[in-house]
Amino acid sequence: MAGSFRPPRPAGPTLEACLAEASAGSPAAVYLFDGDAFLAQRAGRELAFALVKEQERSLNLVELDAAASPAEVANELVTRGLFSSGRKVVLLQEPAFLTSKEDVEESFEEARIQWGVGRQREAARRLLALCAKAGLGAPDLRPAPGDDPGKFKAALGKALKREFGFAPGEDGLAFVVAAAGYAIEREMKAAKDDSGALDAALERGLPPGHVLVIAAGKVDGKLPLVKKLAAAGRRVEVAIPREGTFDAHVVLGPVIQTLLAGTGRKADAGAVERLEALVGGDARTLASELQKLVAFVGDRTVIGADDVEEVVTRTAEDPFFALGNAVEARDLPAALSVVDRTVADGGSPHMLLATLAGTVRRLVVEKERARVVVGDRVLRSSRDWEAQVFPSIPPKEVGKKKPYGFWMKYQASTRFGRGELLDGLVTLHEADVAMKSGQDARMQLERVLLGLLASTGSERRPA
């Protein structure tokens, strides 16, 4: 999606530095790993194992799941381990009370998968914890006697979309209803999302030798508790890095090297490049595919691009959004690069054309919307635009969207003349007809992009 690139955080603590602290016997009280859920769990478990000797883990390493409440975490932290001379570590995995809104869908899907493989209690606990954040309890998730099942599921889907930002499919809704029934029958309730006990424990300081290790996915950094946890120890970002601005792409080299450590295998540059294109930024899938590749290459020590082509199927989302970003930035080389990579990977030129048409139409809409209000004058300030143009947008179109997104599209539209955009729509229509008539699709795409983006500022038609 456009605008998904986020600049990296300033460099902070690393897993290696945390492991060094553990080896030196001077760990921090709290370690919060966040970013990618799979990499965070891997890092959290590695650190926990480094902190607690193997023979003591059954008693002095406590693992809590996603449904654990802050109070449950605090209670474990202040309870001494059975080996009085040893260390106690609480490993908290993907806590729902820290989950960011953008990570709720992934956590929900994990609960659905747990339910499908027979881990009903864990799945129900995770679901209840997520729903509790939205003020929903188990009775709200199951139809009452006499309710029409179809109408109830439709209403439930709308409620979950409103609270979570996504609508579960038919299978997802069936899981919600079944898991709610399971929870009601066993009188399971979501723990109260009250951070007071954990706040107090952090304020007092944990007992000597007690360490809290949190393996989270994306956390809500605005939560006061996240800030307190980071202040009490180390917050370590574990995520697959990205490069670029308008055409951001994953950089898998360092992650692949880490995941292959101990296997006696390494991936060459060609293999890394193909994995970046086929797998993208899904660390869990990447780890699974690397396991297959290690088995596939047998005694060979180097995994090559041909091995990746033979074993790995494409799971990464097609980067159609990157084409829209490049067009909005009026960056011809970046746009052509997206077309090259997508077509080479088997992507659909017709989908690229549809994405391009949607981008140009949106630019036309925003340019015309402002033109009706302020004429051909270009608004340079977001404050001026919000005061003069934003009120003209129908409330139904705005919905819960923020003005900033509309403003960014308007800004992009000012990089083009009005005539250029209208000509672009005509060219897009001609390309669509030509592609459906059997003409070379890639050539038609390049023709549209050259016509729309190749001109310099002095050559642009008037707005």
Image (cartoon, helix red, strand yellow):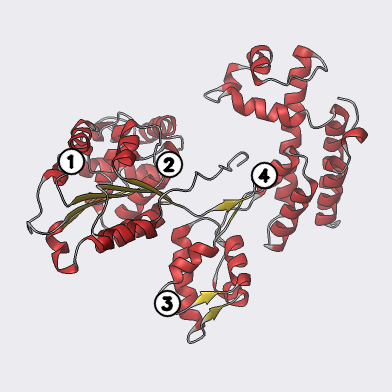
Vertical side of 193 occupied by 108: above or below: below
- Label 2 vs label 4: CA separation? 30 Å
Q: Are marks 2 and 1 in contact (CB under 8 Å)?
A: no
Query: Quick one: SS at disc 1?
Result: helix
Q: Earlier in the sequence, mark 3 or mark 1?
A: 1
Tell me which residue sits at (37%, 57%) in the image: 17
Q: Earlier in the sequence, mark 2 or mark 4?
A: 2
Quarter of the image where one finds residue 3? top right
Left or right, 442 with reference to 88: right
x and y, in percent, of residue 399 in the image: 54, 22
Inspect the image, locate mark 1, and give the three-letter code of the amino acid beneath it. Answer: Ala
Inspect the image, locate mark 3, and give the three-letter code of the amino acid beneath it. Answer: Thr
Query: Disc number at residue 74?
Result: 1
Q: Is disc 3 surrounded by few (<14), some (14 to 19) or many (20+) residues within 10 Å?
A: few
Q: What residue sits right under mark 4 in the picture? A: 246
Asked whether residue 130 appears in the rendered view, the answer is no
Q: What residue sits right under mark 3 in the picture? A: 263
- Label 3 vs label 1: CA separation? 38 Å
Residue 208 or residue 107, whichever sits in front: 208
Tell me which residue sits at (32%, 39%) in the image: 231
Q: Are marks 3 and 1 in contact (CB under 8 Å)?
A: no
Q: Is disc 4 surrounded by few (<14), some (14 to 19) or many (20+) residues within 10 Å?
A: many
